[in-house]
Image (cartoon, rainbow, N blue to C red):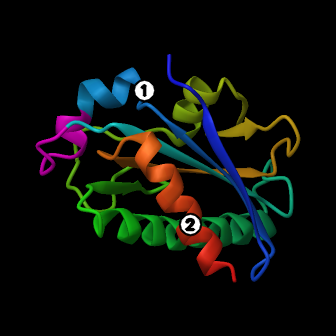
């Protein structure tokens, strides 16, 4: 069992709040990484879970919720690219998982995908609820006002915590 390492960030520039968890990859990721990230040739060592705080509950399918989900996805991808570039400068492999379809953004994977809600549920023991064809996380404080994002890297969690924290803090100034 891995030790939970988390970082809670309040980006003053954008008023965005999110939680970052650094964990060992799930058994599913470890067993299937060669199909998910065919070009890697190395096994992943860390799973980065980002939980972005929504300004509204996401348990509705109205236009306002769709806009909020798009905003959160864009914020996650922007943060993901920042983390990815930071780790790549140190020669680590990093993959961002698209929150909507579960496919890696940089690797070709037509065979399998990752279910962000299922990964968060398994890794953080966070409950979820079914809403139509979707699953929504049920955060202890944010309830359904939470949006998950995943990244996977071959860097060890001890190494990336300081790199991620330093980069995010310097970018928020």
Q: Give residue 169's position: percent from left, percent from top.
A: 64, 71
In screen coordinates, is 21 left or right of 112? right
Q: Residue furthest top?
A: 1
Residue 6 lies in quadrant: top right
Residue 101 seen from this side: no
At x 47%, y 72%, the residue is 82
Q: Give residue 46's position: percent from left, percent from top.
A: 40, 40
Residue 55 lies in quadrant: bottom right
In the rendering, which numbered label is found on residue 76?
Answer: none
In screen coordinates, is 74 left or right of 43? right
Mark 2 lies on residue: 166
Magenta-drawn stretch contains 38: yes
| C-alpha gap between disc 1 and disc 2 | 26 Å
Can you say whether 22 is above or below 101 in the image?
A: above
Residue 37 seen from this side: yes
Mark 1 lies on residue: 26
Q: In the picture, which quadrant includes the C terminus?
A: bottom right
Label 1 neighbour load within 10 Å: few <14, some 14-19, many 20+: some
> Magenta part of the protein: which range?
33-42
Q: Secondary structure at mark 1?
A: loop
In screen coordinates, is 151 left or right of 33? right
């Amino acid at each position: 069992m891995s030790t939970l390492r988390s970082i809670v960030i309040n980006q003053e520039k954008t008023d965005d709040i999110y939680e970052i968890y650094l964990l060992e990859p799930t058994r599913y990721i470890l067993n299937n990484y060669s199909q998910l990230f065919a070009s890697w040739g190395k096994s992943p060592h860390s799973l980065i879970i980002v939980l972005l705080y929504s300004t509204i509950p996401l348990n509705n399918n109205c236009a306002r919720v769709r806009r909020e989900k798009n905003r959160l996805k864009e914020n996650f991808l922007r943060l993901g690219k920042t983390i990815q570039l930071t780790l790549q400068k140190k020669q680590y492999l990093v993959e961002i998982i698209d929150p909507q379809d579960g496919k890696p953004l940089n690797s070709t994977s037509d065979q399998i995908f990752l279910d962000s809600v299922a990964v968060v549920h398994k890794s953080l023991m966070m409950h979820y609820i079914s809403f139509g064809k979707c699953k929504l996380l049920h955060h202890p404080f944010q309830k359904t006002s939470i949006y998950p994002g995943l990244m996977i890297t071959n860097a060890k969690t001890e190494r990336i915590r300081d790199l991620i924290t330093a980069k995010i803090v310097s970018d928020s100034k």
